[in-house]
Image (cartoon, rainbow, N blue to C red):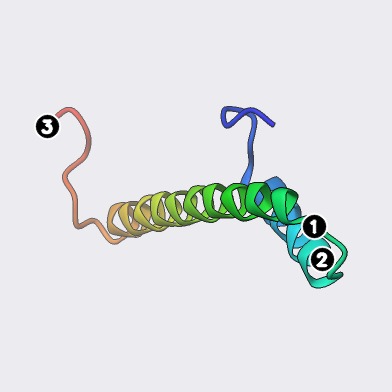
């Protein structure tokens, strides 16, 4: 899945699939390494997405509370 098309929800879903696969205990060692690397990438993506969303929400709340001048000033 291309990182450009990746969404938070699809990343979480893929992480859940990887966890189930690992927990099954029937995964080849070589495949396990690949899955752990992919999980790490997905976790990083999710953290970035959450941080970005948090920042946007905080900025929106500031706008609502009038703590920022209107744009263009």
Q: Which dot, 2 or 3, sits closer to the camera?
A: 2
Please give left or right for residue 63 compared with residue 38 in the image.
left
Secondary structure at badge 3 equals loop
The residue that disc 1 covers is: 17
Name the foreground residue: 30 vs 54: 30
Reply above or below: 24 against 60.
Answer: below
Judge whether residue 9 can be spotted in this image. Answer: no
Reply above or below: 37 against 61.
Answer: above
Secondary structure at badge 1 equals helix
Q: Residue at the spot x=75%, y=57% of the render?
A: 18
Q: Are marks 1 and 2 in contact (CB under 8 Å)?
A: yes
Can you tell which mark lies on residue 20? 2
Residue 41 on image: x %, y %? 53, 47
Q: Residue at the spot x=37%, y=52% of the render?
A: 60
The residue that disc 3 covers is: 73
Residue 50 on image: x %, y %? 47, 56
Judge whether residue 12 can be spotted in this image. Answer: yes
């Amino acid at each position: 899945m291309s990182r450009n098309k990746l969404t938070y929800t699809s990343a979480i879903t893929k992480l859940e699939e990887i966890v189930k696969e690992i927990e099954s205990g029937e995964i080849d060692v070589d495949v396990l390494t690949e899955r752990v690397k992919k999980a790490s990438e997905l976790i990083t993506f999710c953290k970035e997405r959450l941080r970005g969303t948090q920042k946007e929400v905080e900025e929106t709340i500031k706008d609502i509370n009038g703590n920022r001048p209107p744009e263009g000033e």
